[in-house]
Amino acid sequence: MAPPEETTAAHAAAEAAAIEENLAAKTTGDQPISTIVIVVAMQTEALPLVAKFELSEDLDRSVFPKGVPWVRYHGTYKGLHINLVWPGKDAVLGVDSVGTVSASLLTYASIQAFKPDLIINAGTAGGFQAKGASIIDVYLASDVAFHDRRIPIPVIFDLYGIGARRTFSTPNLVKQLGIKVGKLSTGDSLDMCPQDESSITANDATLKDMEGAAVAYVADLLSVPTILIKAVTDIVDGPKPTAEEFMENVVAVSAALHYAVTEVVDFISGKSLSDL
Ligand code: FMC
């Protein structure tokens, strides 16, 4: 049953007030974190988190442009305003809109709409066993870079393409949770061609995904600190074909991811950015 109109209006007004209040408080990194945006790429990754944080789907969708498939779940958990967003299903093909383009647009729109103190990009990733990764391991990405933006014009354009950047530093969180830390390399393909492989090696990456560096780029543009939590679904330098191994593990690994994200959110609750 649809909620009565006054309830929806009151709810929207309360939300707008919370966003304003959050903006007013955002002068230093010392206030408790109030609003977070969790960006995920796949429904399988989103649903365990929606259940855990008891979020409700924003059926009105007026925060996003009309017609986009992007989905937002929201609610309050341990004093934090949580907005969990995923780019939804492709309008034509009906599959999750994975990759850097959707992730960038959604991150941009979500920062504009919710003015978060912090972005969490949570998702699955390939891992390199040569770098110590195993299936179901969960990592915090210390650095991100792209591996498929080759611009071989020396000195500056090549570096722009790689787009390497450090993520928001969270030494206390890493220490408290004992979570693994590694570098993440992002590109728009699930498979890996030889050129991508050498770029990933040059990026010194333990992890390979299709969104992380794009989310971090947009968040950096708009000066929002970002942390990336990635759980390993497949071993890129292992014997199994990536797509097969990914499909085999994605549900179990999404469950592991949701435990890790919960631990991170529990840790964040009541803390300021400088406490992380
Ligand atoms: N390479 C690239 N991306 C992924 C991966 C791999 N070996 N394993 N899992 C992923 C992530 C991507 O970020 C996508 O969101 C999704 O899972 C695969 O389409």
Image (cartoon, helix red, strand yellow):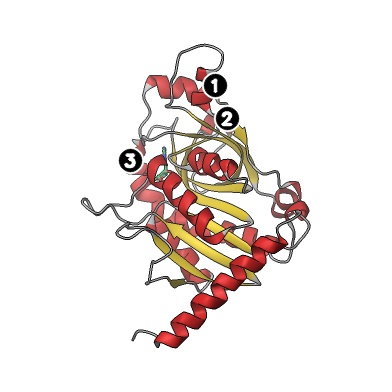
Which is nearer the N-term, disc 1 or disc 3? 1
Q: Secondary structure at mark 2?
A: loop
Q: Which mark is residue 209?
A: none
Q: Residues within 10 Å of mark 3 (few under 14, many from 20)?
A: few
The residue carrying pointer 2 sits among few (fewer than 14), some (14 to 19) or many (20 or more) residues within 10 Å by Cα, namely some
Residue at the image point whose x is 56% and y is 77% from the top? 14
Q: Which residue is mark 2?
A: 164
Query: Which residue is nearer to you in this view: 79 or 232?
Result: 79
- Mark 3 lies on residue: 243
Secondary-structure class at tag 1: helix
> Could you tell which of marks 1 and 2 lies nearer the N-terminus?
1
- The amino acid beneath tag 2 is Ala
Q: Which mark is residue 159?
A: 1
Can see residue 257?
Answer: no
Quarter placement of the N terminus: bottom left
Q: Residue furthest left?
A: 92
Secondary structure of the residue carrying tag 3 is helix
The amino acid on which the numbered mark 3 sits, given as a three-letter code, is Ala
User: Residue 227 location, x and y as percent?
Assistant: 61, 48
The image shows residue 118 at horizontal and vertical percentages of 62, 54
Judge whether 261 appears above or below 209 on screen.
below
Q: CA distance from mark 2 to mark 3?
A: 26 Å
